[in-house]
Amino acid sequence: MDAARWPTGRSQWITSAAARLDVQHWRARSSAVLTGIGSVLADDPRLTVRLDGVDHATPERIVLDRLWRLPADARLLSESGPILSVTGPDAPDRPGLADRVERITVPAHGDQLQLSRLLFALAQRGHNEVLVEAGATLAGAFVAAGLVDELIWYVAPKLLGSGARGALALPEPASLDEVDRWQWHSVDHVGEDLRLVLRAPLAAPTWAWTDGARPA
């Protein structure tokens, strides 16, 4: 309720079973589900669609992993369906994963992959709806870069206190005049919780193609 996340490793669920089931519907409608290697190492997610009796396509599961640290025993590797590792140009080869995971490389800026180039590469693969399920750093980076169309936020009626972690790691604005105002799209009860859907502000994106020209 205080827009925070419980520290990693101390609890698995904050929201209700109904909210977690609702997430499965968003996964099912997406062409890809994307997370970062930090979330994989901390939480070992499967990122699969688990809906009994519902026909759905299998979204590609994508892990942003600049140094290709994906564990060979990660749970997502034990599930059927396509998996894509997105690494930086200096990542080592992993022969043991080559037959289980497809790999593409995108440019990096410092210790971060260039997200605009990543999304262009995913569009070339035919992805038109990518669901980002990530920690505060990666989720915040997508928002800060102007690469998010919609935020889906589940809020439980629980106060986690000052020890909880923020949901988005964003630069602190110099004043409230600099804060983007997102648009409310919907507010719905899901079990005991609320699902908030916000649309991005109608403003020019902050991303830019690194080669200086936007592809046609």
Image: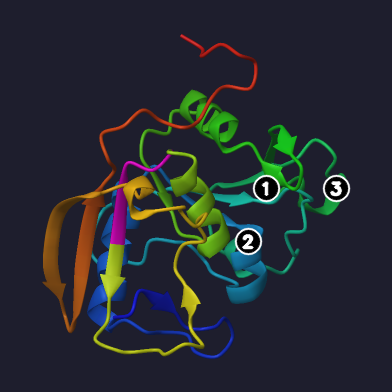
Q: Sequence order check: which comes first, mark 1 or mark 3? A: 3
Chain part drawn in magenta: 147-152
Tell me the kind of residue under disc 3. Answer: Pro
Spatial separation of the CA atoms under disc 3 and disc 2: 15 Å
Q: Which quadrant is the N terminus positioned in?
A: bottom left
Are discs 1 and 3 less than 8 Å apart at CB?
no
Colour pattern: rainbow
Residue drawn at the location 44% of the way across and 61% of the way down: 48
Query: Where's residue 65, x and y in %?
Result: 69, 51
Element assignment for label 2: helix
The label on residue 77 is 2
Q: Which residue is mark 1?
A: 101
Spatial separation of the CA atoms under disc 1 and disc 3: 10 Å
Spatial separation of the CA atoms under disc 1 and disc 2: 8 Å
Q: Nearer the viewer, residue 90 or 155?
A: 155
Is residue 36 found left or right of 163 in the rendered image? right
Q: Sequence order check: which comes first, mark 3 or mark 2? A: 2
The label on residue 51 is none
Query: Where's residue 64, x and y in %?
Result: 63, 49
Element assignment for label 1: loop
Are discs 1 and 2 less than 8 Å apart at CB?
yes
The label on residue 95 is 3
The answer to whether residue 188 is above or below residue 129 is below
Tell me the kind of residue under disc 1. Answer: Val
Are discs 3 and 2 less than 8 Å apart at CB?
no
At label 3, counting other C-alpha atoms closer than 10 Å, the crowd grade (few under 14, some 14-19, many 20 or more) is: few
Query: Where's residue 191, x and y in %?
Result: 16, 80
Q: Nearer the viewer, residue 117 or 40?
A: 117
Residue drawn at the location 56% of the way across and 11% of the way down: 213
Q: Nearer the viewer, residue 76 or 4?
A: 4
